[in-house]
């Protein structure tokens, strides 16, 4: 199979979207060693996270300019091969491409995003979708959103799920739990951190801590959240943590609480399940589809709902153990190897069409 993978994700800070791109690319590399990866020159992610991915570095530009101008030039010089795009964006008018659109949160909730981001993606995304041979997304929920909001035919959209990385699998060797609740998320409005902090504060559980792991972007910083963290010694913000530290947190936590308003998939709950950590998640968007019967569900718009769920799990060890066992089974339903096979079948079908 002759195709090129747009590897701009190697120059971006790692969130769930970049995790998807890295994991799928690593599996593609294993299954098709001759696969070609092309990226701009500025590389942020180290070899520990990218495995054997060795991209061809092309051009002088970075970011969207590289993607819209220099990447198409590279492709045209090589007879216009199929281009695989894994992280929401792609050259707008290059016709031989597959694009992965993880979700359409910027259309559903523009108030969560900067004006620049919103207007850029509102312009780019419909054009990228229209000029793609196939659209891949990460849940049936997101597939319905794409069909409805972008007006594309159902047969043009395929679903390939996320999965927990190998770092988080084989978690049956449980470690002793410690007195903390964990949340893993980037610090932006859709993750509902403010409600989580308020719900935790209402618990008033002596000696219990809330640990929040994830990147904190200055654009989303809230003074109210900052003050609550600084005035409560039991709330610990750890920032971005490496996988080995995240593994320890998942295994030691009494529970993961993930009260997000909107997710295209929602990877941290599945990672937590794979590590033997019971999860509390929102009853919205893709999360019921992803977590099935292996989670405790809350209304993210009701702080009391989040507080009550945490209190119930703290009080009922039997329920926690039940969710741990259900979580192990649920996490096994997701595999990067299988997701890559599905993605490669999509590529093959497009090439054969």
Image: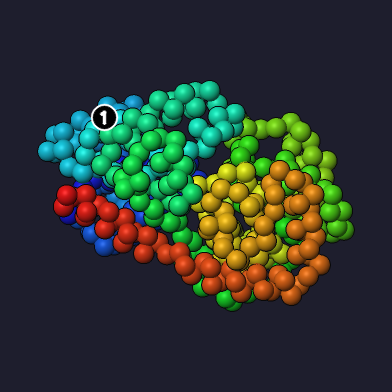
Residue 223 x %, y %: 74, 31
Q: Is residue 105 visible?
A: yes
Colour option used: rainbow
Q: Is residue 44 above or below residue 291?
A: above
| Residue at screen point 72% across, 40% down | 194
| Residue at screen point 24% across, 33% down | 94
Residue at the left extreme, as displayed: 79
Residue 299 x %, y %: 70, 49
Q: Is residue 314 above or below residue 216?
A: below
Q: Is residue 237 visible?
A: no
**179 and 42: which is toward the camera:** 179
Element under label 1?
Answer: loop
Q: Is residue 161 left or right of residue 310?
A: left
Q: Is residue 106 left or right of residue 179?
A: left
Question: How many neighbours does mark 1 have within 10 angstroms: few (below 14), some (14-19), or many (20 or more)?
Answer: some
Residue 344 lies in quadrant: bottom left
**77 and 345: which is toward the camera:** 345
Residue 156 x %, y %: 31, 45
Q: Is residue 280 above or below residue 127?
A: below
Residue 1 x %, y %: 17, 54
Residue 291 lies in quadrant: bottom right
| Residue at screen point 49% across, 49% down | 141
Total of numbered circles in the picture?
1
Residue 24 lies in quadrant: bottom left
| Residue at screen point 37% across, 31% down | 126
Residue position for label 1: 93
């Amino acid at each position: 199979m002759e195709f090129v993978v747009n590897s701009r994700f190697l120059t971006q800070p790692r969130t769930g979207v970049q995790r998807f791109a890295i994991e799928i690319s690593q599996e593609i590399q294993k299954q098709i060693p001759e696969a070609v990866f092309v990226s701009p020159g500025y590389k942020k992610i180290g070899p520990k996270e990218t495995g054997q991915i060795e991209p061809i570095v092309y051009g002088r530009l970075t970011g969207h300019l590289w993607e819209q101008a220099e990447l198409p030039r590279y492709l045209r010089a090589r007879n216009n091969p199929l281009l695989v795009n894994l992280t929401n964006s792609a050259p707008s008018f290059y016709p031989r491409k597959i694009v992965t659109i993880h979700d359409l949160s910027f259309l559903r909730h523009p108030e969560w995003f900067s004006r620049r981001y919103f207007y850029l993606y509102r312009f780019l995304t419909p054009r990228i979708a229209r000029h793609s041979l196939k659209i891949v997304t990460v849940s049936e929920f997101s597939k319905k959103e794409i069909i409805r909001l972008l007006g594309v035919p159902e047969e043009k959209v395929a679903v390939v799920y996320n999965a927990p990385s190998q770092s988080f699998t084989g978690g049956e060797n449980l470690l002793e739990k410690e007195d903390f609740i964990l949340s893993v998320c980037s610090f932006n409005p859709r993750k509902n951190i403010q409600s989580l902090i308020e719900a935790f504060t209402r618990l008033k559980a002596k000696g219990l801590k809330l640990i929040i792991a994830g990147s904190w972007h200055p654009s989303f910083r809230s003074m109210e959240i900052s003050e609550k963290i600084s005035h409560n010694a039991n709330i610990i913000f750890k920032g971005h943590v490496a996988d080995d530290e995240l593994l320890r947190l998942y295994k030691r936590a009494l529970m993961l609480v993930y009260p997000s308003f909107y997710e295209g998939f929602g990877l941290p709950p599945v990672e937590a399940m794979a590590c033997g950590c019971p999860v509390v998640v929102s009853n919205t968007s893709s999360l019921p589809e992803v977590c099935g019967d292996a989670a405790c569900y809350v209304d993210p718009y009701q702080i009391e709902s989040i507080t009550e769920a945490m209190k119930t799990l703290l009080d009922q060890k039997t329920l926690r153990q039940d969710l741990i066992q259900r979580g192990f089974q649920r996490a096994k339903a997701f595999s990067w190897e299988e997701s890559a096979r599905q993605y490669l079948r999509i590529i093959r079908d497009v090439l054969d069409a």
